[in-house]
Amino acid sequence: MSARAALRPSAAFLLAHPAHFLALGLGTGLAPLAPGTVGTLLAIVLYAMLTRWLSPLGVLALLPALYALGVWACGRTGRDLGVADHPGMNWDEIVAYLLVLAFTPAGIAWQVAAFALFRAFDVVKPPPIRHFDRALKGGFGVMLDDLLAAGYTLLVLALAKAALA
């Protein structure tokens, strides 16, 4: 595979293997700009769909399986692309943001704050996120840094909620 193809996966690559489809966020990872943000937006839609049938606790119960699938899918897709943590692989954002949504208080202000915080922590990668992002490779490393960004997001939201109480 050429370096150019590794930089921009195609629709054919997306559909060539189930791992690619999943790791590339059901196609959102093909977005030409900000695929991580597009994947995070997809998580909002998926959460709304899931909570038609499941409680937030039910969504939480589903997350370990989605995380494990992501470890497999991102590992395989990273190997196939020749880039361990390709920007188009955004299943990690989707799963981590589903976790955030399960705990985010109702209300548009909380939802906007959660989205902005999660994207900021994912992009900036404050310690120790940056360390783990650099040190751990493969599917586990891809998935872990976004899980940590979700944890930071939830911590800030909890502190804000306590301050407002």
Image (cartoon, rainbow, N blue to C red):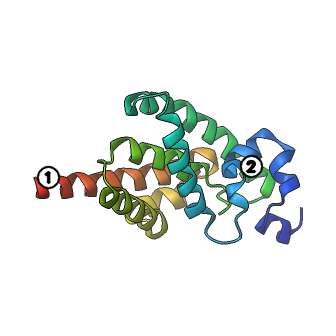
Question: How many residues crowd around disc 2 within 10 Å: few (fewer than 14), some, or many (20 or more)?
Answer: many
Q: Is residue 151 left or right of residue 92?
A: left
Q: Nearer the viewer, mark 1 or mark 2?
A: 1
Q: Is residue 64 left or right of residue 33?
A: left
Real-space CA distance between mark 1 and mark 2, rounded to the nearest whole angstrom = 41 Å
Q: Residue at x 57, y 44 (%)?
A: 140
Which percent across, then down, holds residue 78? 72, 53
Q: Residue at x 65, y 72 (%)?
A: 33
Query: Which residue is denoted by mark 2 in the rendering?
Result: 77
Which percent across, then down, holds residue 16? 86, 45
Nearer to the camera, 146 or 32? 32
Dot label at residue 47? none
Indicate the amino acid at tag 1: Ala
How many labels, in total? 2
Element under disc 1: helix
Indicate the amino acid at tag 2: Thr
Query: Which residue is denoted by mark 1 in the rendering?
Result: 162
Q: Is residue 46 left or right of residue 7?
A: left
Element under disc 2: helix
Q: Earlier in the sequence, mark 1 or mark 2?
A: 2
Q: Looking at the figure, which quarter contains the N terminus?
A: bottom right
Q: Tell me if residue 44 comes above or below residue 2 in the rendering.
A: above
Discs 1, 2 touching: Cβ within 8 Å: no
Q: Tell me if residue 153 comes above or below residue 123 in the rendering.
A: above
Q: Residue at x 69, y 44 (%)?
A: 22
Nearer to the camera, 114 or 152? 114
Nearer to the camera, 105 or 119? 105
Which percent across, then down, holds residue 100? 39, 48
Which percent across, then down, holds residue 161? 19, 53
Question: How many residues crowd around disc 1 within 10 Å: few (fewer than 14), some, or many (20 or more)?
Answer: few
